[in-house]
Image (tube, rainbow, N blue to C red):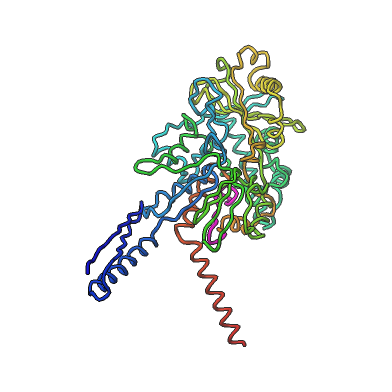
Amino acid sequence: MDFMPIGFIYPERWKCLWCICVVEMENILFWTCLLLLVYRTDVCKADTAHKPKEVLVIGGGISGLAAARKLVNHPSQMFDVTVLEARKERYGGRVWTNRKLFKKPLGAETDLGALWINSKVKDNPILAITRKGELETKVSGPIQLHVPEADKIFKGDEANKIFTEVFSIMQSAVDKVKATGVDIPLQKAVEDEISGHSFQGDRAIITSILRNHNAVSKPDYSTVHFDPVKQFGWNTIVVDGYDQVLDAIVSGLGSELPLSISLNQIVRQIKIDSKKKKVIVRTKDLNQVSADLVIVAVPVGVLRSEAVLFEPVLPKEWYKAVKELGVYDSQKVIVGFSEAFWPSDAGVFTMTTPEGEEPFIQTWFNMQNLIDRPFLVGSLYDGAAINLEQTPIEELKELVIKTLGKLFGGEDLVRQYNLTTIVRSQWTGDPFSMGSGAYPRTGNGEDLWETLSSPVCPYIYFAGDYTSLDGMVGAHGSYNTGIRAAEQILNGRCERELKRQQKRKEEKEKNRRQKG
């Protein structure tokens, strides 16, 4: 007649007490023990219901990291989040502070990806991180406009007047097209505006700036989805490098827990196991891991290449939307000299390119002015950016010297100084980027981003610049798409959608019965 509990099990997180009884059938203690067993089982079921959801974030760029941080920070602590990043040596995606190729680097001069923060954006989350993390930032300083073919340099108010007129023409072109309700390429909209514009400044100079703008130069960039305001305000750098922002997100600020990141995880397949209600993620090395939910945060170029396969396949409208977007190419060239020979009072140097001539690194950013180091960072787009990756390094050096000679007094002057460093990005050929980002093409409708930003319920969510029109305007836009994806999970987006589907199904069945 003994009542003998013989086992207690305490799993790592959720403590469930099981009572196993050995009693004689006729003893009243049997019924007491049975009640206790039922009670403990109910408690354990309640505990199991609160088991953390396992979430895999595919892609360790800034959008994926933002999503992971949002879930990990949730006060319920009900999410076990792991970020799977394809690269072997780093996370961050197209945010890359590559100090390895520089001698005694500080940081900002080695940023081969994201470099600038737009200080004009209200509630910019990147600026908020720099403030909370006490990261030093600096503003670029004034712009100088060089017109080599006319041997002119515009500074201060003169330069500001020219760029103000450029902005005015762009804004007027956009407003007129929006008023018609019919989208056309931005290139055509600007050309139409130029033809009827009464120029206050030099027509040739202003026209050259407009035609070589990276958005205007694309033959299919949407006018109705172009916002000139978002093109201005990119004037702030993180002195020690943009990766300091990433590290703050990953390691956590204040009492935040660090994120869990697994490198060298090249995801090839995302499969839904409906019976187990799990997502199976398979990698290139034939490993697999399961989760309750997945956030896909890989670049649009990778998705368009179908390097990641979905089983079952995603809805047709999703694939169609991904294919309809534009993908642009951009690169950076970082050059260092024995000492600075360029003006110290300007933050940005930009120059015009005569009509019919292929532009090559029109804009250079003055690192000497920002961090007191003799470096210039040049940027270029599209065809020139693609060609850059294939250009032999010695040929690239000559092109850089020739270009800087146009800006700063001739090639002979530039050659007097020792070119100590030349480093370039290669985002187009990078298999984990396949381009630099997405842009809206002529004719893209709002429903496109509704499709790309919506989860494929109940298991798959999406983050990345391509999932939002606002996401295409820099790192802060991509970051916000990660926050949105996490909020969709936290707010029960899929649970609500499934309930709506079930209700519609029930109503349809009810109507069928009534008609029958």
Q: Is residue 464 magenta-colored?
A: yes
Residue at 57%, 44% in the rendered image: 473
Q: Please, which residue is most extreme toward the top here? A: 416
Please tell me which residue lies in front, 221 or 475. 475
Rendered position, 261 above or below 107 = below
| Residue drawn at (59%, 46%) of the image | 286
Examine the image and state in which quarter residue 16 appears: bottom left
Instruction: Looking at the picture, tell me which residue is in the foreground, 344 or 265.
Output: 265
Q: Position of residue 65 (x, y in %)?
A: 49, 44
Q: Is residue 185 left or right of residue 248?
A: right
Instruction: Locate residue 391: give its quadrant.
Output: top right
Question: Taking the image as drawn, is residue 322 in sight?
Answer: yes
| Residue 419: percent from left, percent from top | 61, 17
Q: Position of residue 18 (x, y in %)?
A: 32, 62
Q: Quadrant of the C terminus?
A: bottom right
Q: Residue furthest right?
A: 356
Q: Which one is in front, 98 or 388?
A: 98
For residue 422, above or below residue 325: above
| Residue 429 inside the magenta-drawn segment | no
Which residue occupies the foreground of this view, 176 or 374?
A: 374
In the image, residue 357 lies at what x, y percent? 75, 30
Quadrant location of the N terminus in the rendered image = bottom left
- Total count of labels: 0
The span picked out in magenta is 456-471
Q: Is residue 144 visible?
A: no
